[in-house]
Image (cartoon, rainbow, N blue to C red):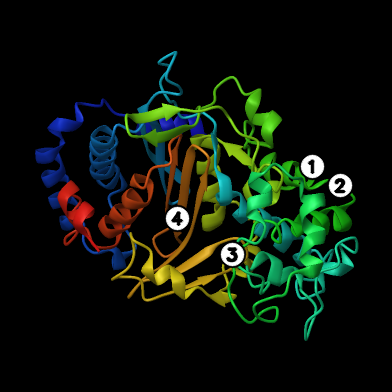
Amino acid sequence: MAAKNLASCRRARGSASKSSLALVLVLAALAVCGPAQSQSLDSAALHAAFDSHFLARMSEEQVPGAAAAIVYRGQLAGVSLWGNRDDAGGIPIDDATQFRIASVSKGFSGILAALLAAEGKIVLDQAVGRYAPQYQLVDGPRPLTVEDVLGQRSGFVRNAYDNLIEAGLEREEILPRFASLKPLCPPGRCYSYQNNVFSLVEDVVASATGRSYAEALRTRLLQPLGMTTTTLGYEGFRTATNRAEPHLKTGKGWRQIRLRTTYYQVASAAGINAGLLDMSQWAIAMLGHRPDVLPAAVIDEVLRPRIETRNELSNRHWRGILADAHYGLGWRIYQLPEHELAIHGGWVAGYRAEISLSRELDLGLIILSNAETRVVGELGRAFWDLAFDPAGANMSTAAVQTSP
């Protein structure tokens, strides 16, 4: 069904430089459709406006490659594609091209753990040491729980020992070091984003299921959702025949770099590789359209705010409009003045990814890129400005670039 929906959503693409007049007309059409509060929008017009802006910004920044998808009411409502998989072959990005999604992987871990909790196989407020006794973290007023791990409230200094991940050490070598690391606050009391600590969910899943984290992820989520090309880990990506190569920006522009193994050591935190079609199925499921795989109560549990993340209020793309922000279980929750978003970004050597969902509008956006570009975050903000307020949104390049 996804392929059929994709085919129906495709449209001829003109030059990005010709988008200005079309964009004005589309914005006018969206305004006629009425405000977002009506719970109905013209998804074709929304995609047309976003697509024009997406192509224009990618062209202006000369981004090597990117792909974006809009899902609405359980369907794939539009796809936008830009650029090539690599510098050498000039093979265009397509809707199945694999990207590293980096920390967007955390959302899968949150759902997997919540599913196991709903089945009584784990207890979220249970000490994580019960499931991972081999790692003795510092004892505090109370033990570190599974919920603390997934909710980024371990109390350790932010991104603790990520430098060791980048140095190539395995998690089995890194995690024992936490036994001598003094927390900044007791568990559950303060927000501190982690990759190493987050990866303890792998031991929790293995203990509860008798399977590796990778196998549990595949059988419980990827296969049932039809995410047939999604893989976990370095080898899965290295052997993919349709993958986007990583790029970094230099003084002479974007340069392709070699694929790196770093952060694949913490697979639950940053190890998933996926293409646009598969990620669209994930977004559709997270919006409640696959209750056979993701029950509504599980989604509610994952997106329930666990800890306030006030540092997000200064996010360059959202400050000035973000009223409050929290972390759930592997997901961020953004409180806008009149709306709420579930959102998470990913950023790893040569790749950038972002997923954002409005359960209110039954609408989602996925953006993947084989370049570490801030345009991904910029486009996400511009999209939601348009979706929530089509009459007042301004998606012109100048307006987005100069916004606070």
Q: Are marks 4 and 2 in contact (CB under 8 Å)?
A: no
Q: Which residue is mark 4?
A: 356
Residue 362: where, in percent of width, then height? 43, 57
Q: Earlier in the sequence, mark 4 or mark 2?
A: 2
The label nearer to you, 3 versus 1, is 3
| Circle 3: residue type | Tyr
Callout 1: few (<14), some (14-19), or many (20+) C-alpha neighbours within 10 Å?
some
Residue 321 visible in rendering? yes
Q: Is residue 7 visible?
A: no
Q: CA distance from mark 4 to mark 2?
A: 30 Å
- Mark earlier in primary sequence (3, 2): 3
Q: Which residue is under mark 1?
A: 215
Q: Residue at x 30, y 68 (%)?
A: 37
First reached walking from the N terminus: tag 3 or tag 1: 3
Question: Which secondary structure, mark 1?
Answer: helix
Q: Amino acid at mark 4?
A: Ser
Classify mark 3: helix, strand or loop.
loop
Of 334 and 220, nearer the camera is: 334
Residue 211 badge: 2
Rendered image: mark on residue 193: 3
Give SS at disc 4: strand
Q: Secondary structure at mark 2?
A: loop
- Extreme-top residue of the structure: 89
Residues marked 1 and 2 touching at CB (< 8 Å): yes
Which mark is in front, 3 or 2? 3
Quadrant of the rendering where the C terminus is positioned: bottom left
